[in-house]
Image (cartoon, rainbow, N blue to C red):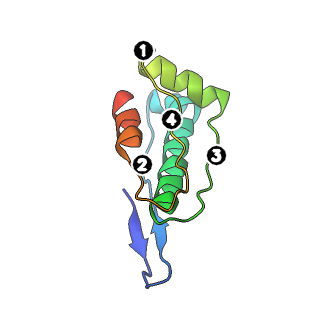
Amino acid sequence: MFEIVNPSEQRCTLRHTLEMTTHGSSIISWPLAFRPMHDSLIKDSLALSQASLSQLSHVQKWTTLVKVLRWLVSKGKAGAQVTPKLTGERIDTSKAVSAAQAIR
């Protein structure tokens, strides 16, 4: 979830805050598996937000680690990274939503 900070007609800041206390197996699983996937998801979300506002989006390609983790978590069903394109038209977010649902 994002929080909109200092909105104006010309700009706003989207803030994502994650607060957690790790214990047990999450001490290992969070930094090694879930954090890389989480960070990639957030970066993809921000790129999609930029594109939906008809701005040039800054897409960072997934690392090999993230691709492998997504494949493992989805049992081989994870799709390729969806990269928004700046077309001047409304962005179709259905592929991005489907990709996110595939790894749940």
Labelled disc at residue 20: 2
Per the image, label 3 sits on a secondary structure element best described as: loop
Neighbor class of circle 1 (other Cα within 10 Å; few <14, some 14-19, many 20+) is: few
* Nearest to viewer (mark 1 / mark 3): 3
- The quarter of the displayed image where residue 65 is located: top right
Q: Is residue 58 left or right of residue 81?
A: right
> Which badge, 2 or 1, is on the more N-terminal residue?
2
- Expressed as whole percent of the image width and height from the top left, the position of residue 38 reads 49, 42
Quick one: label 3, few (<14), some, or many (20+) residues within 10 Å?
A: few
Q: Relative to 9, is 84 above or below?
A: above
Could you say which disc has been placed on residue 75 in the image? 1
Q: Quadrant of the C terminus?
A: top left
**Circle 4 is placed at which residue position?**
30
Cβ–Cβ below 8 Å for labels 4 and 2? yes
Label 1 with label 3: CB-CB less than 8 Å:
no
Q: Earlier in the sequence, mark 4 or mark 2?
A: 2
> What residue type is disc 2 on?
Met
Query: To which quarter of the image does residue 56 belong?
Result: bottom right
- C-beta proximity under 8 Å, tags 2 and 3: no
Q: Position of residue 44 (x, y in %)?
A: 52, 47
Q: Secondary structure at mark 2?
A: loop
Q: Which residue is mark 3?
A: 60
Residue 88: x and y, percent? 50, 62
Q: Depth check: 72 or 19 in front?
A: 72
Amino acid type of disc 3? Answer: Gln
Kind of residue at disc 1: Lys
Q: Earlier in the sequence, mark 4 or mark 1?
A: 4
Helix, strand or loop for disc 4:
helix
Compute the Cα span from label 3 to label 4: 21 Å
Q: Nearer the viewer, residue 68 or 58?
A: 58
